[in-house]
Image (cartoon, rainbow, N blue to C red):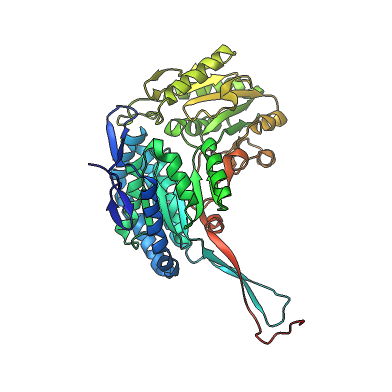
Amino acid sequence: MTLQFLIGGEAVSAAEGRSFTRHDPVTGAVATVAAAASVADAMKAVDAAARAFPAWAAMGPTERRKLLNKAADIMDAKTPDFIAAAVAETGATGPWIGFNVMLAANMIREAAAMVTQVGGEIIPSNKPGTLAMGVLKPRGVCLGIAPWNAPVILGTRAVAMPLACGNTVVLKSSEMCPATHRLIGQCFAEAGLPAGVVNVISNAPEDAAAVVEALIQAPAVRHVNFTGSTKVGRVIGRLAGEALKPALLELGGKAPLLVLDDADVDAAVNAAIFGCFMNQGQICMSTERIIVDDSIADDFAARFAARAAGLPAGDPRGHVVLGGLCMPGAGEKMDALIADALAKGGKVLAGGTRQGAVVTATVIDHVTPAMRIYAEESFGPVKPIIRVSGVDEAVRVANDTEYGLSASVFGRDIQRAMAVANRIESGICHINGPTVADEAQMPFGGVKASGHGRFGGKAAIAEFSDLRWITIEDPHQHYPF
């Protein structure tokens, strides 16, 4: 059975009957057969969203809140369905997808709580008898483009706050997890949101460029949000810029975890294990560089490697911590990163083995700037330890990257750790916590090549609303001529 689009509140097949197949990255079995959108199909979704916009924008906040909260409850109830779909499509473990559903449902609830915060302000005017206001209004149709790595979280994040602000949405699902993203749309449909408020389309990988360009250029689309790689984000940003449309871009990362000389080593190891290997390291915030002071580096490396070596890896349907890598060729990339590091003096302390898409938790010590793993986003469970001498070198290495999404600093002297955090170029930084963290109400986003704009809570209201200047004036005011 072919998975259909959600357009205008209906399950719709591709106009030309085209479909594509997504295979389980671990077993190779067919995971999903999904409808493959043409540009014409994509425009039908935009048209449906445009038709639904006036009524949704005019709906009172209480009714909008009620519908969003109902969608969140439905999402929670569909947790087993999400787990089954996403494990098969992405190779992730069940606990990771279960966490995805929990956080995504809470993102919808947080968005529901924001419906009465889309307000404005009274601004003093120099014109006598004038009431001047800054008023937030919904933009219109918002296009969301979501990735596969945290499929429920990121697919939901692409639509929840736009809806709360009074926009309608088109979600372009990832080619890696069309069924998982289609389930998100189903939650909103079953909650009773009016037809066309939420639309979900899927496309074959070879059609992605044409479909995305057409969606961005569609006159009714007024805003674009994209989560994914920096390489693709540059393309999205360029297309949106050419169309003079605002874009929220949350892109790649090379998150550093700094372990200062006064750090609690066991605490830092715990955070590094979680940040490095959750979801096989396939998270934009994944710890990608462990920067350790020389004075404690031997102790940290030994404890960290021992913990990593004990993490079970295999079929995500079993009792494992690491499942499979999602993208074709990802395993071979891990092999290449390890080989390059070894050839240039790196030392593998744990892991370094692979069976198909399953790569063991791998730790490489004595990493230098000459190695690919130093600067290149691995997006997998191969992690470097970089030894430094003192705080200044730790900060320099942390900032020696084009990326700037998440970071972490471990140290017992909180004032010093805070001073270090303030010197790190990133949109997010945690003191004595892991680089991987997300809460629905927090401003989430990066700097530099990690993108711009913020998802989450009040910060997202500005992204998905237009600020208008409106005045009520004295009709008999004086004019100079």
Residue 420 placement, left or right of 32: right
Give percent across and percent down for residue 136. 55, 65
Left or right: where 194 falls relative to 402: left
Closer to the camera, 57 or 150?
A: 57
Q: Nearer the viewer, residue 254 or 162?
A: 162
Residue drawn at the location 46% of the way across and 63% of the way down: 166
Q: Quadrant of residue 424?
A: top right
Q: Using the image as rendered, state which of residue 231 and residue 357 is in the foreground.
A: 231
- Asked whether 340 or 362 is in front, the reply is 340
Residue 382, percent from left and from top: 49, 24
Task: Please tell me which residue is depicted at 29% across the width and 38% down the height of the picture.
Answer: 32
Q: Is residue 388 above or below residue 44?
A: above
Residue 130: x %, y % from top left: 67, 79
Q: Is residue 166 visible?
A: yes
Quadrant where the C terminus is found in the figure = bottom right
The N terminus lies in quadrant? top left
